[in-house]
Image (cartoon, helix red, strand yellow):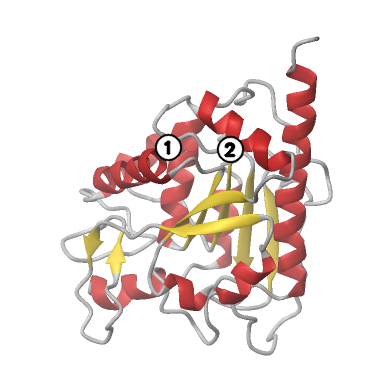
Amino acid sequence: MQLGTHLGAHLGRAQPGELGAEPPAPQAPGGCCTPGWGIAHPRRPLRAPAGSIAVWDAHLGAHLGAQLAGAEPGRVLCTPRRRFRERTGALRKALRGRAELVALSAPHPVSDGDSDDDPRGWWFSGPGTFEAQEEAAAPAGLEESLSAVAAALAERGPFDGLLGFSQGAALAAMVCALRARGDPRFPVAFAILVAGFASRAPAHGHFYRQPIALPTLHVVGDTDAVIAPHLSQELAQRFVEPVVVAHPGGHFVPAAAPQKKAYLDFLDRFRAEERASSSHSAPLQ
C-alpha cells in the first residue's frame, strides 16, 4: 500500500468524525476510563515510580513553577500537524486554561494526490510506504524526526508535555523512552498518546526494552480500524503506571465529555503532583 494512501490515515485522514470533534453515534458500549491490562485506573493518583525522573531541567522547572502558581497554562507540543488547528477546535476548547497546543509538522513529505493539506510522515517502514504492523527491515526517516522534535523543544519551548496521534503518538512514545533514560534533548514531563502503537521494526526495539517511566495518558478507540485497539493497549503496557482511556469511536482524537474529563483529570493530577513535589523539595527558609 502506498504511503500516500495508508499513511494518510495515520496522519489524520480519520474515519467518520474529525480530529477533536465528538465522535459519531456509538457503535459499541465504551467508557471513559478503562482499567485492566495490568494498567493503572485513571482515578488512582499517579506516583512517580522509583528511578523515574524527579528533577527536570532548570528552565522547564521554572516554567512549571510559574504555571502551577496559576500564571499560565501548560504548553504541549503536538504531532502531527495535518490540518491540525481546524480539526482540533473542540480539543483546544476542552483544554482551554490548562494547556496550549502547539503543532509540529513532520519533516517527510508524503505524496498524496487526494489531499491539498500538505500531508507528512514521521518515518517510513519501506520505500515510500508505511504500515504500523510491518516488521520493517530498513525503516527510514526516524532520526530526522527525532531531531525535528528536539529542535522544536529547544527553539519554541519550553514545553511541559507531548500530544501525539497515530504515527505521531508512536513517535512521541519513542521520545518518552529517550527522556526517561535522561536524554537532555527532550525535556518533557508527560505525554498524551492517541491511537498510538509500538513500532515493530527490529531497529526500533531498543525504545521498548525497559518499562518507560514517564507519566502517560493513552486514548484508545474501540472501533479504530486504522490502529487496532490492541496495538494501543500494547503500547500502554510499555509504560510504568499508564492511564488508559477508551472511547467507542474510531481513528480520531475524541473530545466528548467523558474524554474531556479524562484529559483534564490527567493534566490536573500531574500539576498537583508537581506542586507537591516542588514544595517537598524546596529549601527551608
Q: Give above or below for 267 relative to 220.
A: above
Residue at the farthest bottom position:
25
Q: Which residue does the image show at 56% across and 52% down from the upper left? A: 234
Reading the image, the residue beneath label 2 is 189
Reading the image, the residue beneath label 1 is 207
Residue 54 at x, y percent in the picture: 64, 24
- The crowd level at tag 1 (other Cα within 10 Å; few <14, some 14-19, many 20+) is some
**Amino acid found under the numbered disc labelled 1:** Phe
Residue 99 at x, y percent in the picture: 62, 55
For mark 1, give the secondary structure: helix
Residue 46 badge: none
Residue 32 at x, y percent in the picture: 76, 66
Looking at marks 1 and 2 on the same chain, the residue that comes earlier in the sequence is marked by 2
Q: Is residue 162 left or right of residue 128?
A: right
Residues at circles 1 and 2 in contact by the CB criterion of under 8 Å: no
- The crowd level at tag 2 (other Cα within 10 Å; few <14, some 14-19, many 20+) is many
